[in-house]
Amino acid sequence: MALVVVGPRVVELVREEGLPVPGSEPECEVAGPDGPVGLTRDQARRATTAVAADTRDGSAVTAPDTSDVDDAVLRVLADGPPEGAGPSLSCRGSAADDLAEEQITGSGLTPRAQAVLEQMTVVFGDQVLGGFAPGGVQRAGESTHNDGRAIDIFYQPVTEENRRRGWLLAHWLVAHEDTLDIQYVIFDDRIWSAHSRSGRWQPYDAPEPGGEILRHLDHVHVDVLRGGSP
């Protein structure tokens, strides 16, 4: 095990920036009813998968063992924070910088994005999807959809129940970002980035004219890392 020595000024700086002090904070955190609850990445993966398996039709997985996760944490992940559906799980970003760049395949997705789709389908069953098509799609401006690196998963109409369902998926994606090379997850006026060392959900600044689609109120957007040279 490597010993990391952190000077007091470094600790002060990372705290000022809202970053984790090395060795001092868990990889993931759930906003529990009595305050934040730290989880290892493995616990976060198992917890989000268990909640999905227990609450979603069409899951092809058996709920993993979560005996080491507080029941209150599982309830928050299943139902949302006390004030209603919303972001409750955050995980520190770990964007890999040694990935090869990939090209669109016949499905309209890169292999990395295809892997996200396949794993997501195993856990959550068939979904209403968009944002990609065989041969690719072309959206105005720069878009990870144009590169075959993004998938939209729709939860329509916009209701409290569909918000809850969307957050189940969004949290699962964040918990698995390191194994699936996920870059961004956007949903419900919030964005999570693998490039963020703090791992906190941030307000999403939707382009004009806004609305349900541009604000990602009716769908979860997930995209994967490009790879190649920065």
Image (cartoon, rainbow, N blue to C red):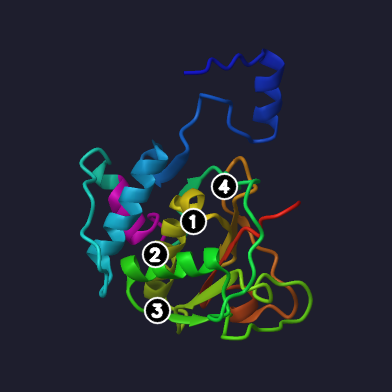
Badge 3 is on which residue?
Answer: 127
Q: Which secondary structure, mark 1?
A: helix
The three-letter code of the residue at mark 3 reads Gln
Please tell me which residue is depicted at 65% across the width and 21% down the height of the picture. 11
Q: Is residue 5 above or below residue 47?
A: above
Is residue 52 rendered magenta in the image?
Answer: no
Taking the image as shown, residue 72 lies to the left or right of residue 176, namely left
Taking the image as shown, residue 71 lies to the left or right of residue 10, namely left
Mark pair 1, 2: CA separation? 9 Å
Is residue 81 rendered magenta in the image?
Answer: yes
Q: Is residue 105 above or below residue 88?
A: below
* Residue 135 vs residue 128, the one in the foreground: 135
Mark pair 4, 1: CA separation? 19 Å
The three-letter code of the residue at mark 1 reads Leu
- Nearer the observer: mark 2 or 3; the answer is 2
Percent position of residue 62, x then y: 20, 59
Q: Earlier in the sequence, mark 1 or mark 2?
A: 2
- Counting other residues with Cα less than 10 Å from the Cα at mark 3, is it few (<14), some (14-19), or many (20 or more)? some
Q: Which residues are magenta?
A: 73-84
Q: Earlier in the sequence, mark 1 or mark 3?
A: 3
The image quarter containing residue 142 is bottom right
Badge 1 is on which residue?
Answer: 180
Badge 4 is on which residue?
Answer: 200
- Counting other residues with Cα less than 10 Å from the Cα at mark 1, is it few (<14), some (14-19), or many (20 or more)? many
Q: Which secondary structure, mark 3?
A: loop
Q: Earlier in the sequence, mark 4 or mark 3?
A: 3
